[in-house]
Image (cartoon, rainbow, N blue to C red):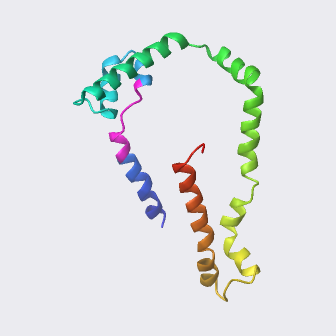
Amino acid sequence: MLSFLALPALFQLMLMYFIPESPRWLFRRNKKQKAIRALRKFFNDNDPKGQEEVESEIDRIEQAENIEGNIPLRDALYELFNIYNRGLLVGMVVLIGQQFSGINILMYYGPTIVRQAGFGGTTARDNLINSIPLAVVNFISSVSAILFPDT
């Protein structure tokens, strides 16, 4: 059973070989030619519009790197905790609060909840089948959140 669960992880590991490195990261490491090759994978280089997009993206990355420069870790942490402290606090509260929202309880104890609500059958298999609608609603909500962010 454990090996069956490892198959998606192995599949992801194999596919990660084909993911190009981040062009911005390559620019930071002074590997401009590799960054340009990585950008060409994102844009159609045979199309004149694609070539323009690659060049504009290169210019945008270079400008951002010149503006930002190398910020020392101490300054970055100061900015994070002193300037953005309210946003950081709100973000942490939201992330921690999600753990207490109830979805974990519904997903883990769904069959028991369904049975105690009077919708379950007499066997554990019946209870598990009756909790499938919970998983379907969770799936639909997750897909809609991925497809329509910030709408």
Name the spot of residue 123 as percent of width and height, x first. 64, 87
Kindly tell me whether residue 45 is visible in this rendering: yes
Q: Residue furthest bottom?
A: 122
Is residue 52 rendered to the left or right of residue 123? Answer: left
Kindly tell me whether residue 69 is visible in this rendering: no
Q: Quadrant of residue 19?
A: top left
Q: Nearer the viewer, residue 53 or 78?
A: 53
Q: Nearer the viewer, residue 94 or 105?
A: 94
Instruction: Please name the residue shown 30% across and 19% down the image.
Output: 33
Is residue 46 rendered to the left or right of residue 86? Answer: left
- Magenta span of residues: 15-23
Above or below residue 6? Residue 70 is: above
Q: Nearer the viewer, residue 38 or 142?
A: 142
- Whether 141 is among the magenta residues is no
Q: Quadrant of residue 58?
A: top left
Is residue 51 rendered to the left or right of residue 89? Answer: left
Q: Quadrant of residue 103?
A: bottom right
- Whether 21 is among the magenta residues is yes
Name the spot of residue 23 as percent of width and height, x first. 40, 25
- Which quarter of the rendering shows the C terminus? top right
Name the spot of residue 63 as percent of width and height, x first. 46, 13
Above or below residue 79? Residue 2 is: below
